[in-house]
Image (cartoon, rainbow, N blue to C red):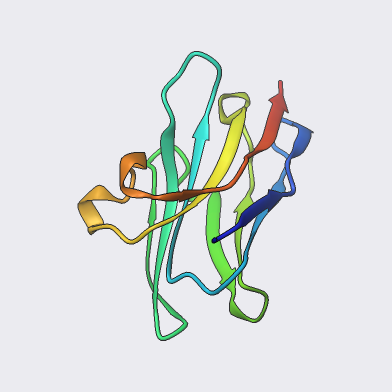
């Protein structure tokens, strides 16, 4: 069974930074980050597609472009989400997910069969 464990969440002030990590039990070529705020639907934040252990494509939600960076550390079977210039509206539970999708479907949570338990990010103004 595949396991995905997120870490790195916490509380920061607006303008601050956090780096989320998602450790996988094995190498996974396609991964995504999603978030869900109370009372809102889960939304795609970023997705990464790799081939032969090299990153081929990354996708970002418009709301985080230029502020968030998705990368991976293949040696540790870990994907990272560097979040800079955080805003209060970034407050949510963040989940990593595994699954390969088409480029047009990367933000659809139903396309990802494997999920972590989540890590909370809280940004205060």
Given the current orientation, which residue lies at the most extreme front position? 1
Question: In the image, is 3 to the left or to the right of 19?
Answer: left
- Image location (x, y in percent) of residue 66: 49, 50
- Image location (x, y in percent) of residue 51: 37, 80
Q: Nearer the viewer, residue 121 or 119?
A: 119
Residue 80 quadrant:
bottom right
Question: In the image, is 94 to the left or to the right of 105?
Answer: right
- Image location (x, y in percent) of residue 61: 39, 43
- In the picture, which quadrant includes the C terminus? top right
Given the current orientation, which residue lies at the most extreme bottom position? 52
Residue found at x 62% / y 27%: 91
Does 9 appear above or below 42? below
Question: In the image, is 101 to the left or to the right of 2?
Answer: left
Does 36 appear above or below 99? above
- In the picture, which quadrant includes the N terminus? bottom right
- The count of marks equals 0
Does 91 appear above or below 33? above
Residue found at x 77% / y 37%: 10
- Image location (x, y in percent) of residue 122: 70, 28
Q: Nearer the viewer, residue 5 or 2?
A: 2
Given the current orientation, which residue lies at the most extreme top position? 39
Q: Nearer the viewer, residue 22 or 68?
A: 22
Residue found at x 71% / y 47%: 18
Residue 11 quadrant:
top right
């Amino acid at each position: 069974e595949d396991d995905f464990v997120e870490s790195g969440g916490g509380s920061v002030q607006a303008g601050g930074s956090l780096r989320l990590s998602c450790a996988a039990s094995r190498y996974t070529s396609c991964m995504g980050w999603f978030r869900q705020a109370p009372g809102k639907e889960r939304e795609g934040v970023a997705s990464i597609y790799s081939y032969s252990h090299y990153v081929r494509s990354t996708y970002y939600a418009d709301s985080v472009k230029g502020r968030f960076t998705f990368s991976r550390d293949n040696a540790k079977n870990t994907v990272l989400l560097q979040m800079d210039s955080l805003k209060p509206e970034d407050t949510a539970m963040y989940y990593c997910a595994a699954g390969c999708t088409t480029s047009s479907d990367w933000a659809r949570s139903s396309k990802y069969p494997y999920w972590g338990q989540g890590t909370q990010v809280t940004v205060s103004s």
